[in-house]
Amino acid sequence: MAKLREYLQKMLRWLEVDWRAKRAEKQQKKLEEKTGIKIGDWREHIPKDINDNLESIISALTKDAELEEDKAVSSLKGLQAIIKPYPHFHWQNLHPTLHDLVFPYYQSEDYYSAVYQGIIKYKNEVKRKTGSSLTDRNLFENIFSISDPKLSVTKKFKKTDGSDFEAVTITNITEGHRSLVIAMWQAFRCPLSHEAVKDLRESGLYSEQDCLDALGLLSYLFRRLDDSETP
């Protein structure tokens, strides 16, 4: 009798776990039908560190029998609106010119090519805007020359009262911007042209996070280019 009782208790625990799992599966299917979100497909394109934290929230939405269906639906939709597939891509708020260009590289997790192609695109946009026949570093040094610039990234801006900014402020931004453009070319485009990505990545000399940070800086340079004018 004792063995039978122990066996029956194990069976009841197993049935309870199995029932909860099936109920969660049924709830997930209902949520997917109501929201149009395939939870498995969505989570497949979210990095592990974010997915680990997401697990408990998804579990609560699919396993909580007390949660009203409409609240579960709105919660899941809101969650996906915040955490989209490839979230780092969306959270970076990249410049529109970069957005479509680099997204395929995000999908394949090829962040090195994303940076390289982004820098080439920036160079070409500078050439297009200025009509310059120069290229590479010579182009940037000429267009953003301190003594004879072809584009100004500060000219259109005034203080809220309509007055000019201090000359030292304009000088700092102008010189700093020029240095950033040249540094972007020298620090990223040149190494990516002359070294194997495998060596850069595995040595840690340039990590994937470095590439993501570089794309943020590149996006800033594109926004500055949008606002640039002839002096």
Image (spheres, rainbow, N blue to C red):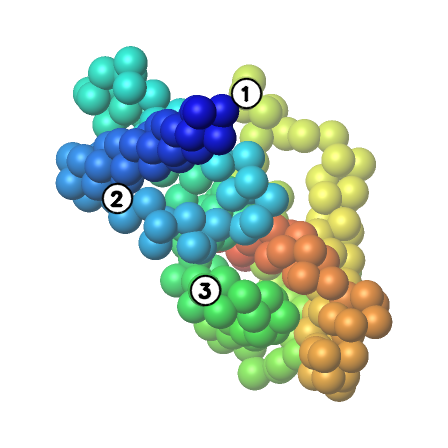
Q: Circle 2 is placed at which residue position?
A: 37
Q: What crowding class fits label 1: few (fewer than 14 Cα within 10 Å), some (14-19), or many (20 or more)?
A: few
Q: Is residue 217 left or right of residue 204?
A: left
Q: Is residue 178 left or right of residue 31?
A: right
State the image quarter where residue 230 is shown: bottom right
Query: Which amino acid type corresponds to the residue marked 3 in the rendered image?
Result: Gln
Location of the N terminus by quadrant is top left
Q: Position of residue 220 (x, y in %)?
A: 59, 49
Q: Residue at x 63, y 56 (%)?
A: 212
Callout 1 secondary element: loop
Mark closer to the observer (1, 3): 3
**Which residue is nearer to you in this view: 19 or 222?**
19
Q: Circle 3 is placed at which residue position?
A: 107
Badge count: 3
Query: Which amino acid type corresponds to the residue marked 1 in the rendered image?
Result: Thr
Q: Circle 1 is placed at which residue position?
A: 160
**Which residue is nearer to you in this view: 139 or 34?**
34
